[in-house]
Structure formats: structure tokens, C-alpha cells
Amino acid sequence: MAAAGIRELRQNLSRYIDRVKAGETIEVTERGKVVAALVPRREREDEIAALEARGVKITRARLDFRSLGPIPKRKPGQASPSEVLEELRAGERY
């Protein structure tokens, strides 16, 4: 497994991306410590096929929103969700 410092990676990013696309994993270091890794992206179908081969059943999670019931009505004088959110975020910097 190859390693590259942040400066080296920044200066030669295209080369490292080409290596990752070819299947290599690159560890990213900062002051000699590994802080991240660039790994080849596996296709989702490959991941699902591997799980199914191991006997894991893959199903799509589904939520029936009707099971949640009707959306409650606001009471007179009650703040809207937007107003509540605005109040909660008052004074925050974005």
C-alpha cells in the first residue's frame, strides 16, 4: 500500500487518482501519521452480489407514510416549523 503526504498528494493528485482507479489504495499522511485513505470505489452491484453470495438477504427499506397518520394541524398562535427553526438558530453563524 502506497502512502503520500498531503502536500505531495495535492501537487500530484491526478497521478494518485489514476493509481486508485487502477485498484491501488493510497494512505494519506500528515506529519507522518496516516489520516485518511484513498480507496477504489467498488460498484454497488459488486458489493450487493458479494453480500448475497455470503447469504445476506438484501431488501430495500420501505416506509409507508400512511402508517404515520395524518399531519397534525397547528393550533392558533402556534409557531410554524420555519419560525421555530429560525428561533433555534438565532445568533448562529453559518
Image (spheres, grey):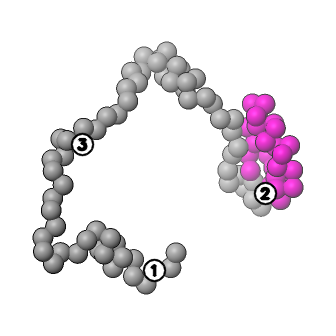
Q: Can residue 88 be seen in this view?
A: no
Q: Residue extending furthest left?
A: 75
User: Mark 3 or mark 2, which has the lower sequence index?
Assistant: 2
Q: Nearer the viewer, residue 71 or 19?
A: 71
Say few, some or many: other residues with alpha carbon within 10 Å of mark 3 (under 14 / 14 to 19 / 20 or more): few
Q: Name the residue beneath numbered marker 3.
A: 65
Give the residues in magenta.
1-28
CA distance separating discs 1 and 3:
33 Å
Q: Name the residue beneath numbered marker 1.
A: 92
Disc nearest the viewer among 3 and 2: 3
The residue at 86%/43% (across/down) is 15
Q: In this view, does 57 lie above or below 81?
A: above
The residue at 69%/35% (across/down) is 40
CA distance separating discs 1 and 2:
32 Å
Q: Which of 29 and 63 is in front in this view?
A: 63
Q: Does the magenta stretch include residue 12?
A: yes
Q: Does the magenta stretch include residue 11?
A: yes
Residue 72 sits in quarter: bottom left
**Residue 64: where, in percent of width, then height?**
24, 38
Disc nearest the viewer among 1 and 2: 1
Say few, some or many: other residues with alpha carbon within 10 Å of mark 1 (under 14 / 14 to 19 / 20 or more): few
**Residue 59: where, in percent of width, then height?**
37, 26
Q: Can residue 23 be seen in this view?
A: yes
Q: Name the residue beneath numbered marker 2.
A: 6
- Name which residue type carries label 2: Ile
**Residue 79: where, in percent of width, then height?**
23, 75
- Name which residue type carries label 1: Glu
